[in-house]
């Protein structure tokens, strides 16, 4: 009986813990409706805009951007820095008050640890190439890749835990000897670059350059005996385990339901941040997202993509609505071509031929798509780098809608209507394969795909099938290059053309097209070695022209606008608007620091009313 009572007691305790864990948290000071669930809380593996936005709340890197001004660089954890040796050596001086959320001091060596993670192929970081500006980083990546490749060829009996450990120890020693990063003391970080890089500080503000807490990472890291790779158990990113150094920390993360942030009591500057608590709700369906906002579930919806968006914008124009806001952005919506010789199923890939890619590009009427399908005010794009977005960079013309030339390009690739049925065939008489268009569900991509498919059918005679996948599956297929044509989108991460052009570079972590062109790679290398700033831009202009007029790894459709829903902070009379959201940055780079956002509450309204009454009384007294 005692044993039974003991078991019952344990079960009751466990049940109580489960109920407590699922108990609703208090209403947050700021509630955000996100378009989808977060992919990761690991800053070195982030690449999506909503992941980056979260990272700026829970981590603090060396510097940050002036999001209300010209997007210049402001101090972050680094209170000051010097640049020496002709722009090659950066010395950062860290605020000694910097702490991790568990109370440990933030050390300069934590940055060395984090950045080295991003440089190694083991981490599979999308942005590993950004770190190649640092001396020895790219060589380390290649050295480790070769090392792992050689290890994988060893007989299984030789691939032991001890051998994997020895391999890792060699990697650490090699990194310490060859990579231009050092921490001479806890508050000094010295970084040596391969060459002067004008946008390096811009990179340092970007989320993959955030530090991580080494003891936490190491606790969830193990060596895989079979591959020799460092593997990580990403349980370290769970609220119960994560250690962060930003203004906020996760208290709760209920997958696909909500994330709840609270102030980090160890943050070095307790004055930063208006909201004490932030709730983030992921809602994948665009209609549900808007409906949730309209019924009071959130203060800000970060991405409005409903089919009736054009009607909402028209309502605002007619003063019937004030909570939809359009922003020009540093981004491009496009469709990717799989540029590999073979498709994922082993078939020959017709899009391996640049002439085919040019044909499909010129067969799309982008103006018709933005005017009649999207209907939200976007501008058609013939280039990848948004036109006019970077001072001194002149965009090429690109390829415009030209169905006659499109058909000629397809025929030059050997795809000709040989029997008069309107369908192009190759020399063997085989029809052009059905073009599968991959996209993620829950947005306007299906409408765009349908429109493009009709144009390709009309002007090229090809058949199209639509392949809609849940976001996680879609992203996995992109990474595996398991598609023919796939929707894509990119927002620049720093103020230089390479933030777009590097996506076409051989081996880049974000090159989901498998595009590899030695001529293009040589242009990027030439630009990287060019010390004259104007001449460097000329080289990058030619690289953009080459990919947008000759090789076409992507088909750009429009320059992005972005749409938020939030109540403006002031009403039409200029008074505080109860429930309005203050602090949203209007800058095209789309960086929003959550700690700068503040919801207008009743006290704000009362304070404004008191000030107005006092001013009126003073005026009367005169």
Image (cartoon, rainbow, N blue to C red):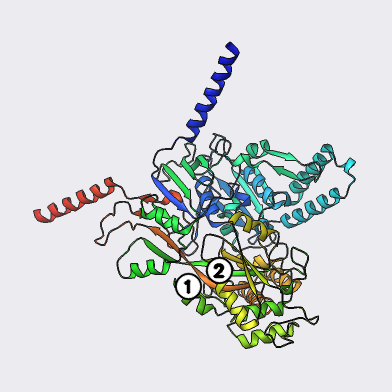
Query: In the picture provided, is 244 more to the left or to the right than 157?
Result: left
Where does the image place residue 239, in percent across and percent down from the top left?
55, 38
Res 117 visible: yes
- Residue 409 or residue 264, whichever sits in front: 409
Q: Residue 619 versus residue 128: which sits nearer the camera?
A: 128
Residue 447 % position (x, y): 53, 69
590 lies left or right of 212: left
Q: Residue at x 45, y 50 (%)?
A: 594
Q: Could you tell me residue 188's position as x and y percent?
A: 61, 45
Q: Please tell me which of labels 1 and 2 falls first in the chain.
A: 2
**As drawn, 49 above or below 551:** above
Horizontal relation, residue 589 to residue 349: left or right: left
Q: Helix or strand or loop: what does disc 1 sit on?
A: loop
Say which quadrant the C terminus sits in: bottom left
Q: Which residue is mark 1?
A: 378
- Residue 69 visible in the displayed image: no
Secondary structure beneath dot 2 equals strand
**Image-based side of 310 in relation to 238, left or right:** left
Label drawn at residue 71:
none
Q: Are marks 1 and 2 in contact (CB under 8 Å)?
A: yes
- Image coordinates for residue 557, horizontal then vertical, percent: 56, 73
Disc 2 crowd, CA 10 A, few/some/many (<14, 14-19, 20+): many
Residue at point 50%, 33% (across, down): 21
Q: Tell me which residue sits at (60%, 82%) in the image.
A: 458
Quadrant the N terminus occupies: top right
Dot label at residue 333: 2
């Amino acid at each position: 009986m005692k044993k039974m009572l003991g078991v019952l007691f344990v079960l009751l305790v466990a049940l109580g813990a489960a109920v407590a864990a699922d108990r609703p948290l208090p209403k947050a000071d700021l509630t955000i409706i996100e378009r989808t669930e977060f992919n990761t809380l690991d800053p070195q593996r982030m690449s999506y805009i909503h992941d980056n936005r979260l990272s700026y709340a829970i981590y603090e890197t060396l510097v940050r951007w002036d999001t209300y001004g010209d997007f210049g660089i402001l101090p972050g954890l680094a209170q000051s820095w010097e640049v020496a040796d002709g722009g090659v050596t950066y010395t950062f001086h860290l605020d000694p008050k910097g702490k991790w959320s568990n109370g440990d001091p933030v050390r300069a060596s934590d940055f060395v640890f984090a950045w080295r993670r991003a440089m190694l192929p083991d981490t599979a970081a999308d942005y590993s190439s950004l770190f190649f500006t640092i001396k020895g980083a790219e060589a380390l990546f290649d050295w480790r890749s070769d090392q792992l490749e050689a290890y994988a060829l060893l007989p299984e009996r030789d691939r032991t835990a001890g051998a994997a450990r020895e391999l890792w120890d060699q990697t650490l020693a090699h990194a310490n000897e060859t990579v231009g990063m050092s921490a001479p003391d806890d508050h000094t970080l010295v970084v040596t670059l391969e060459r002067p890089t004008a946008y390096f500080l811009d990179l340092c503000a970007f989320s993959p350059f955030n530090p991580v807490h080494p003891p936490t990472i190491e606790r969830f890291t193990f060596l895989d005996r079979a591959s020799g790779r460092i593997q990580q158990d990403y349980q370290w990113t769970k609220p119960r385990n994560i250690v962060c150094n930003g203004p906020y920390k996760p208290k709760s993360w209920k997958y696909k339901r909500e994330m709840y942030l609270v102030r980090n009591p160890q943050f070095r500057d307790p004055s930063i941040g208006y909201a004490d608590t932030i709730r983030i709700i992921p809602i994948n369906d665009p209609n549900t997202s808007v409906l949730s906002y309209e019924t009071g579930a959130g203060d800000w919806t970060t991405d409005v993509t409903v089919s009736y968006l054009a009607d909402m914008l028209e309502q605002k124009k007619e003063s019937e609505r004030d909570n939809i806001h359009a922003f020009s952005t540093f981004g491009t919506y496009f469709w990717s071509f799989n540029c590999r010789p073979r498709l994922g199923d082993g078939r020959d890939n017709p899009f391996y031929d640049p002439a085919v890619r040019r044909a499909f590009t010129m067969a799309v009427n982008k103006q018709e798509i933005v005017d009649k399908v999207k209907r939200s005010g976007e501008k058609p794009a013939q280039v990848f780098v948004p036109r006019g977005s970077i001072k001194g960079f002149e965009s090429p013309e690109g390829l415009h809608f030209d169905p006659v030339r499109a058909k000629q390009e397809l025929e030059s690739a050997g795809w000709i209507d040989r029997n008069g049925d309107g369908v192009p065939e190759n020399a063997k008489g085989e029809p052009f394969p059905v073009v599968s268009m991959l996209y993620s569900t829950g947005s306007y991509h299906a409408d765009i795909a349908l429109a493009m498919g009709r144009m390709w059918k009309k002007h090229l005679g090809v058949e199209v099938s639509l392949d809609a996948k849940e976001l996680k599956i879609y992203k996995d297929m992109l990474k595996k290059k398991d598609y023919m044509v796939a929707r894509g989108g990119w927002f620049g991460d720093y103020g230089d053309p390479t933030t777009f052009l590097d996506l076409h570079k051989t081996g880049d972590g974000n090159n989901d097209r498998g595009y590899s062109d030695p001529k293009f790679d040589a242009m990027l290398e030439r630009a990287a070695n060019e010390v004259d700033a104007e001449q460097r831009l000329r080289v990058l202009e030619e690289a953009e022209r080459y990919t947008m007029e000759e090789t076409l790894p992507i088909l750009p459709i429009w320059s992005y606008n972005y749409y938020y829903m939030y109540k403006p902070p002031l009403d039409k009379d200029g008074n505080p608007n109860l429930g309005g959201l203050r602090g949203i940055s209007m800058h095209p780079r789309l960086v929003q620091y959550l700690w700068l956002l503040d919801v207008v509450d009743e006290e704000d309204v009362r304070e404004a009313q008191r000030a107005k009454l006092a001013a009126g009384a003073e005026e009367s007294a005169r």
